[in-house]
Image (cartoon, rainbow, N blue to C red):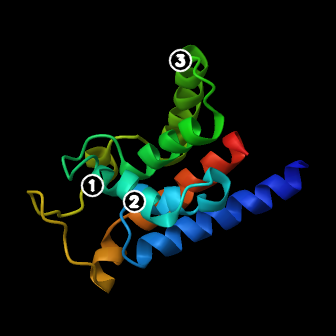
């Protein structure tokens, strides 16, 4: 695949992930669902797979769910059972994501954003989307996944 074509596909995947997040999916789910056709998995399976990872893994503000979606895609699309290669691939994605966004840690990415504590997700509203970088982070994770995995 030529670089221009790959960059166009990566932008489309990013836009799709951002749109999916804005439509109510969690960050990991949005990134996974943007690659539904490539994974060969059905929508319901991808939704269930990504469900626990939003909010930095169950809203604990650990590793960003969007980044985790990209990491899961690395396994789904590229793993052949060689852990050294799998780990190197995930580290590459993580380094690119951190370079673009400043971190892979949800709490650091949301620094300065008022968030509620606990396991209950915040209600999605226009204000929610305006004060959070999450839609952009879903775009970024999906774009990086496309550039490194397709």
Q: Could you say which is closer to the camera, residue 100 or residue 27?
A: 27
Which residue is painted at 38% across and 69% down in the image? 25
Q: Residues within 10 Å of mark 2 (few under 14, many from 20)?
A: many
Q: Which residue is mark 3?
A: 83
Q: Which residue is mark 1?
A: 55
Q: Residues within 10 Å of mark 1 (few under 14, many from 20)?
A: many
Circles 2, 1 touching at the beta carbon (< 8 Å): yes
Q: Is residue 100 above or below residue 124?
A: above
**Is residue 56 rendered to the left or right of residue 22?**
left
| Number of residue marks | 3
Which residue is painted at 22% across and 50% down in the image? 58
Q: Furthest-right residue in view?
A: 2
**Is residue 89 rendered to the left or right of residue 46?**
right
Circles 2, 3 touching at the beta carbon (< 8 Å): no
Earlier sequence position, callout 2 versus callout 1: 2
On the image, the x and y values in percent for residue 11 come to: 69, 63
Q: Which residue is mark 2?
A: 27
Q: Is residue 18 above or below residue 126?
A: above
Q: Secondary structure at mark 2?
A: helix
**Is residue 8 rendered to the left or right of residue 130?**
right
Q: Secondary structure at mark 3?
A: helix
Mark 2, mark 3: which one is toward the viewer?
A: 3
Earlier sequence position, callout 3 versus callout 1: 1
Which residue is painted at 86% across and 49% down in the image? 3
Earlier sequence position, callout 2 versus callout 3: 2
On the image, the x and y values in percent for residue 34 come to: 57, 63
* C-alpha gap between disc 3 and disc 1: 27 Å
* C-alpha gap between disc 2 and disc 1: 8 Å
Q: Secondary structure at mark 1?
A: loop
Mark 3, mark 1: which one is toward the viewer?
A: 3
């Amino acid at each position: 695949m030529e670089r221009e074509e790959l960059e166009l596909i990566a932008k489309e995947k990013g836009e799709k992930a951002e749109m999916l997040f804005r439509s109510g999916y969690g960050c990991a789910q949005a990134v996974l669902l943007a690659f539904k056709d490539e994974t060969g998995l059905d929508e319901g399976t991808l939704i269930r797979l990504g469900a626990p990872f939003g909010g930095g893994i169950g809203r604990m503000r650990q590793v960003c769910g969007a980044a985790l979606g990209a990491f899961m895609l690395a396994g789904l699309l590229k793993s052949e059972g060689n852990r050294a290669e799998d780990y190197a691939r995930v580290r590459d994605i993580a380094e690119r994501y951190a370079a673009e966004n400043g971190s892979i840690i949800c709490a650091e990415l949301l620094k300065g954003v008022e968030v509620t504590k606990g396991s209950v997700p915040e209600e999605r509203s226009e204000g929610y989307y305006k004060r959070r970088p999450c839609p952009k982070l879903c775009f970024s994770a999906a774009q990086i996944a496309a550039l490194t995995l397709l």
